[in-house]
Amino acid sequence: MKAAVFSKFGDPAEVLEVREVPTPEPGPGEVRVRMIASPINPSDTMFVEGRYGVRPTPPAVPGFEGVGVVDKAGPGLMGRFVVGKRVVAINNKGGNWAEYAVIPWKQARPVAADIPDDQAATFFVNPMTAVALTRHVLAVPKGEWLLISAAGSTLGKMIVRLGRRDGFKTLCVVRRSEAKQELIDLGADAVVSSSEGPVPEQVRRITGGDGPRYALDPIGGEAGTAVFRSLGKGGRLVVYGSLTDEPIAVDPRSLITSRTSVEGFWLGYWMAERSIPKALMLFREVATLIREGVLSADVGKSYPLERVGEAAREAAAVGRGGKVLLKIGAGG
């Protein structure tokens, strides 16, 4: 089979190449998925660069999510129930940028026929993170401000739409002033640009001097520090990424006197703690929101697997329009 492989860590556009590799066989409790499509997410890029929490030993194949059809089950009873079904393929160790991928049967989630391949391919990482962070981890109440950095990202835009639906207010942080209007048009309640002055000062002006009680950051470094310093008393910052690989500066006095807090979130760990019934309920929740257009992904360009380097370069471009997809095989 064909797979996108990297033999050393580095820029995905430079180190990825498509090779013929042995077609994998599913083991006990596993299924094999004939892949249809898989997106290029920041986590995939960091995986290839060697900067992600899951660090493989090259040669390795990226791809944490995607859509495909289960064509074979390994030994065991449960995997047989998904053979022949189109599924969301959740691959915690990477491996979906290939014609076939092997995953635990629990991570092959059947997807309804009315959800198209491009939305099914992007079903898990961003939509599930948006629901988990806003409705479950932070449980942002109606009428409260939620401060979001990297708000122009696919996930940031989903959270803005989810805020409009659920009734919490979104205060977005972007780097470029020209990115502000798009978020306002999308429904953001307020947008600030780090290029227009200190973020904490802008945030406090908007929130009447109090600062928000809820915040999300996937960047770290200076941007994450600015978000933390924007928090009001009792504020909670959840960090779900580290795009800069730089630490957030936390003043212990703020933790003590203002009762602020910082915590981490990793979707894979969080989902592993859910029971099977609760996980199924979450998937139904996300599917409903995708159908409503709240958590639908803005899909930009699509590339065949053979052009993975070009696709990776497009995914890294500043100001690109929508999520980049790898089209791997025929639809289900």
Image (cartoon, rainbow, N blue to C red):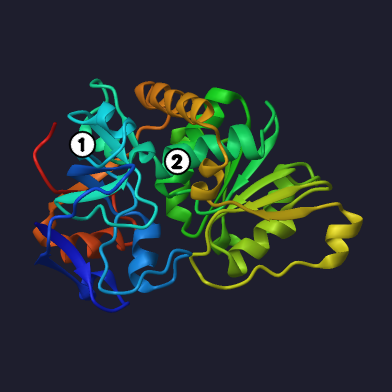
Left or right, residue 54 beside residue 82: right
Q: Position of residue 148 (x, y in %)?
A: 58, 48
Q: Nearer the viewer, residue 108 or 65?
A: 108
- Dividing the picture into quadrants, the one containing residue 119 is top left
Most foreground residue, 275 or 215:
275
Q: Which quarter of the rendered picture does the C terminus lie within?
A: top left
Q: Foreground: 70 or 289? A: 70
Q: Residue at x 66, y 62 (%)?
A: 226
Residue on which disc 2 sits: 157
How packed is label 2: few (under 14 Cα within 10 Å), some, or many (20 or more)? many
Q: Disc 1 designates what residue?
A: 70
Rendered view: 44 above or below 279: below
Observer able to see residue 325: no
Q: Is residue 113 visible?
A: yes
Residue 162 position (above or below residue 46): above
Q: Amino acid at mark 1?
A: Val
* Residue 230 in the image, given as x and y percentages of width and height: 72, 54
- Which callout, 1 or 2, points to the residue nearer the camera? 1
